[in-house]
Amino acid sequence: MRNVWIALLLGSVSLYACSQSPAENSTLVQQQVQDAYLKATSGIDAPTIRADAVLSHLQDGSLILVDVRQETEMAVSQIPGALSLDEFKQKYQANGPPKDKTVVAYCTIGYRSGKFAEKLTAQGIAVRNLEGGILAWVGSHGPLVHSDSAGVTAATTTVHVYGKEWNLLPPGYQGVW
């Protein structure tokens, strides 16, 4: 029954959004992402960081981005420079990440990355959970990349959104699940 209500709500919002200007639609989507993030992460106790703050540090080398999504999700797109969970573990399991770097974990909305951030926080590692996950990232105009089977990386606007109910992307992006 809950899924029926969610579907009806999202359908109503979609109809409303179609009658809005692109700027109004983008603001509405950002609010939906924030609401979904807060609901999904209630009860998670981990430090957070906003997408715009990550964007401002993307090129300075102070962050270690960790994509905790499944391989099928990461195959669609990732934040540039992000490590998979396995890559992070292989690289930093023995000695941990450098003390002068902050780990930023992300997933679709922030639940899985929040659980990961809780674990790292308990280990004394400087970590932040990306508020709103990859959905907030694209809402803040953060870049995404896709790597093909030959390892060639290119910009993309396609996002694996985990499921239909999480298809909360701003105009110009395509969600797949």
Image (cartoon, grey):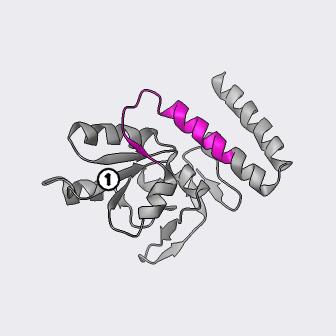
167, 150: nearer the viewer = 167
15 left or right of 132? right
Q: Which residue appears farthest toward the top when viewing the image? A: 1
In this rendering, does residue 118 appear at all? Answer: yes
Asked which quadrant contains residue 62, the reply is: bottom left
Name the spot of residue 30 as percent of width and height, x first.
Answer: 64, 47
Mark 1 is surrounded, within 10 Å at the Cα level, by few (under 14), some (14 to 19) or many (20 or more) other residues, namely many
Name the spot of residue 139 as percent of width and height, x first.
Answer: 61, 54
76 left or right of 95? right
Please give the range of residues in magenta: 29-49
Asked which quadrant contains residue 4, the reply is: top right
Quadrant into which the N terminus falls: top right
Looking at the rendered structure, the kind of residue marked 1 is Val
Q: Give the residue displayed 37% in from the left and 32% down from the top.
A: 45
For numbered disc 1, what is the local secondary structure?
strand
- In the rendered image, residue 39 lying in the magenta stretch gets the answer yes
- In the rendered image, residue 164 lying in the magenta stretch gets the answer no
Q: Give the residue displayed 54% in from the left and 31% down from the top.
A: 39
- Residue bearing mark 1: 103
In this rendering, does residue 164 appear at all? Answer: no
168 over 38 or under it: above or below: below
74 over 81 or under it: above or below: above
120 over 39 or under it: above or below: below
